[in-house]
Amino acid sequence: MDVVTALLWLLVLHAGLGAVDTIVSHEWRERLPHRSWAAGELALHSARSVAFVVIFCGLAWYEWHGALGWLIVAVVLLEYAITIGDSVVEDRTRRLSVLERSNHMLLALNTGAYASLLVLQVATEWRHAPTSLVAAGHPPLLVATLTFAAVMVAAWAVRDGVASLRMRSTAGSKFGDGLQEQPWPPRRLD
């Protein structure tokens, strides 16, 4: 298996872990879109989802040659920075369940793995080619799976972004001074 195919399979794993985090932890257990104190977290989730749309589609459909290779690496680094910010916000506003915390650890490990493979590919192969996006010929199953993941993530980016904006406007009109954090310590989930 070549480096890019391994990278794409890790992205499929990431999409699956992310779906569990979103559906089970954020939607079902926490009901974040219905919690006014979660507006900041949802805004971060929306921004991160946009980055994943670029990562999933960008790597499934294209090879990022020359300087563009470092651009897709920058998108991955941006996603990681958003995730770090999200972790800080989560720790300030709620207590995560064992499932959610464990899933976040797996997502972080997987991010390190796929980011390492991406940097390896850019540093050893793509950077030497003329700067351009080149259509990739990856296995159709991988392309279809990551494209489907990107569509779903894009839908959730809109959903989380709209929920965050709705909460911010509602909180501003009700409280005058913006959103309040959930009381500390938050309820115990595990």
Image (cartoon, rainbow, N blue to C red):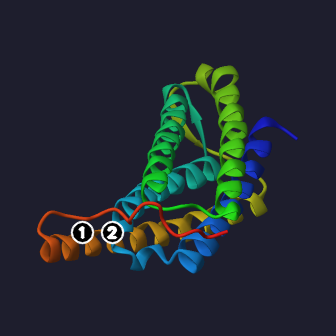
Cα–Cα span, label 2 and label 1: 6 Å
* Image location (x, y in percent) of residue 124: 70, 21
Splitting the image into 4 quarters, where does residue 76 fall?
Answer: top right
* Side (left or right) of 97 relative to 133: right
Say above or below: 187 vs 79: below
Q: Note whether 1 is above or below 184 in the view shown.
A: above
- Whether residue 137 is visible here, answered yes or no, is no
Query: Is 46 or 56 nearer to us in this picture?
Result: 46
In the picture of the structure, the residue carrying the numbered disc 2 is 164
How many numbered circles does the render carry? Answer: 2
Residue in the image at 53% along x and 54% along y: 52
160 or 92, which is in the foreground?
92
Q: Amino acid at mark 2?
A: Ser
Q: Is residue 124 left or right of residue 166?
A: right
Residue 34 badge: none
Side (left or right) of 124 relative to 128: right
Depth check, front residue: 58 or 160: 160
Disc 1 residue type (three-letter)? Arg
User: Badge 2: how crowded within 10 Å, few (<14), some, or many (20+)?
Assistant: many
x then y, percent, for residue 140: 76, 61
**Quadrant of the drawing holding the C terminus:** bottom right
Q: Are marks 2 and 1 in contact (CB under 8 Å)?
A: yes
Could you tell me if residue 133 is visible in this image? yes
Residue at image x 75%, y 58%?
Answer: 142
Task: Name the residue that disc number 1 marks.
Answer: 168
Question: Which percent across, then down, holds residue 114?
Answer: 70, 40
Q: Helix, strand, or loop for circle 2?
A: helix
Query: Does residue 127 lie above or below 48 as drawn?
Result: above
Q: Is residue 44 left or right of residue 189?
A: left
Q: Position of residue 177 (x, y in %)?
A: 14, 63
Q: Nearer the viewer, residue 104 or 73?
A: 104
Residue at screen point 65% across, 44% down: 108
